[in-house]
Image: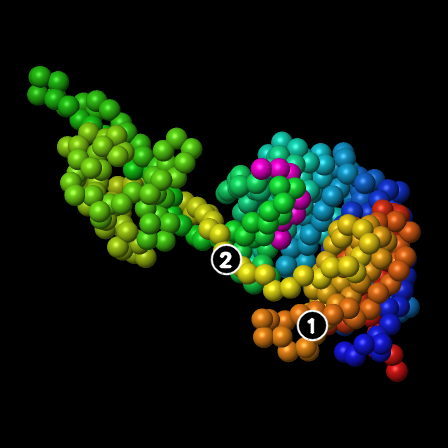
């Protein structure tokens, strides 16, 4: 791509929403020869609209209006990787799951739990997990269960202010979350085993009969090769191998010391043979999702190209970065060939002033290799663009 040989063509303006359009999402399973491109848009008018391109003339038409579930602004929408489910999050504190059944979109599940507005929703690469974030400062991780059921498997509370957006890595179970606390957090998903250890303390009653005097339950988590125990609301490490005696473990987990030596042996065995199925009398174990931070370093900063707040950026398959801002403009950047030793740098490829009449809230490249881009705005419209090469 050379400077000056690219042009941004406006293909069509999609109208129908009666309030600002916050976000859009292309259906990743669409855009093939037998399946025309489909996208969803969500708005302050409490509705979600499904748009489809007509193959015969290339025009986009509204195929469905989803307006019977959310009672406040719909802030975010995202298709599952297979394109069968659509998740929408709303200021009514719920997330709705929609399925296309025989050409009609039906709400098959409503996820509740956030205390305030749900501002963003995102599927992981496999479609097995859904992340939501909220004004209540939390990120919730939902696991997709059979029958369109969803179970919350983790609530992340690391941010100190509203969480604005969540986004999964395109291939790995790494989650990004950004907040009004001016931080971006990276969370790596691991499958670990959470289990309960139940101890029954038996005593002789003086007549030769024995009875259960006490039942003690300890919640443990095997995180990689690290053993953690839940004490009140915090997971704390248990150094089983480093404990010199059963008294150490007994003191740490508040168990009678005479009943700990066998448990210590079981725990050590579980840590060393975690990949084998071991029946040690533990109660039922379930998959537990835990997170750790990744380390990133800064490459470069693009500044001075927009006059007001930048609300949205998106990277195309061929490495073109599109950005939209409160200055109503679109900007496009590509990697520069300046040969800097510290890493890649980027240069301005193209700009479009007054791409919309008001703030641009979202830009998204199409799911295929074609250079189609969609943008949404406070002016209530969605625009379809094509980045073309001059001939």
Secondary structure character of the magenta stretch overall: strand
Query: Label 1 crowding class (10 Å Cα cut-off): few <14, some 14-19, many 20+?
Result: some
Image coordinates for residue 94, horizontal then vertical, percent: 67, 37
Q: Quadrant of the C terminus?
A: bottom right
Residue occupying the point 85% across, 61% down: 384
Query: Label 2 crowding class (10 Å Cα cut-off): few <14, some 14-19, many 20+?
Result: few
The residue that mark 2 highlights is 295
Q: Earlier in the sequence, mark 1 or mark 2?
A: 2
Report whether 140 appears left or right of 253.
Answer: right
Report whether 317 appears left or right of 262.
Answer: right
Residue occupying the point 21% across, 40% down: 263
Q: Tell me the element at label 2.
A: loop
The residue that mark 1 highlights is 335
Give whichever of 340, 387 is nearer the camera: 340
* Disc 1 to disc 2, C-alpha distance: 23 Å
Q: Residue furthest toward the top?
A: 206
């Amino acid at each position: 791509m050379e400077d000056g040989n690219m042009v941004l063509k406006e293909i069509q303006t999609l109208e129908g929403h009666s309030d600002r359009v916050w976000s859009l999402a292309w259906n990743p399973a669409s855009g093939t020869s037998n399946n025309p491109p489909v996208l969803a848009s969500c708005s302050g008018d409490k509705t979600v609209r499904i748009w489809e391109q007509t193959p015969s003339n290339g025009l986009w038409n509204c195929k469905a209006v989803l307006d019977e579930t959310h009672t406040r602004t719909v802030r975010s929408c995202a298709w599952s990787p297979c394109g069968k489910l659509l998740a929408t999050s709303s200021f009514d504190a719920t997330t709705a799951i929609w399925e296309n059944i025989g050409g009609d979109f039906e709400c098959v599940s409503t996820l509740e739990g956030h205390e305030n507005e749900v501002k963003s929703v995102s599927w992981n690469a496999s479609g097995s997990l859904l992340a939501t974030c909220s004004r209540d400062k939390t990120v919730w991780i939902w696991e997709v269960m059979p029958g369109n059921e969803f179970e919350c498997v983790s609530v992340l509370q690391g941010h100190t202010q509203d969480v604005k957006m969540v986004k999964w890595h395109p291939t790995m179970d790494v989650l990004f979350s950004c907040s009004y606390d001016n931080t971006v957090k990276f969370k790596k998903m691991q499958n670990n085993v959470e289990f309960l250890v139940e101890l029954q303390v038996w005593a002789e009653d003086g007549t030769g009969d024995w009875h259960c005097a006490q039942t003690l339950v300890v919640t443990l988590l095997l995180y990689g090769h690290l053993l953690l125990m839940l004490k009140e609301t915090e997971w704390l490490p248990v150094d089983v191998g480093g404990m010199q005696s059963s008294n150490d473990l007994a003191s740490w987990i508040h168990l009678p010391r005479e009943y700990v030596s066998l448990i210590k042996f079981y725990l050590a065995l579980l840590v060393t043979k975690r990949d084998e199925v071991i029946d040690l009398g533990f109660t039922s174990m379930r998959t537990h999702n835990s997170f750790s931070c990744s380390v990133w370093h800064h490459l470069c900063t693009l500044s001075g190209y927009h006059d007001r707040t930048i609300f949205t950026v998106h990277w195309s398959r061929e490495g073109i970065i599109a950005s939209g801002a409160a200055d109503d403009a679109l900007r496009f950047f590509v990697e520069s060939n300046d040969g800097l030793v510290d890493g890649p740098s980027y240069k301005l490829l193209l700009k479009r002033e007054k791409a919309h009449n008001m703030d641009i809230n979202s830009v998204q490249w199409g799911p295929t290799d074609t250079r189609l881009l969609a943008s949404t705005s406070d002016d209530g419209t969605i625009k379809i663009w094509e980045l073309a090469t001059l001939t």
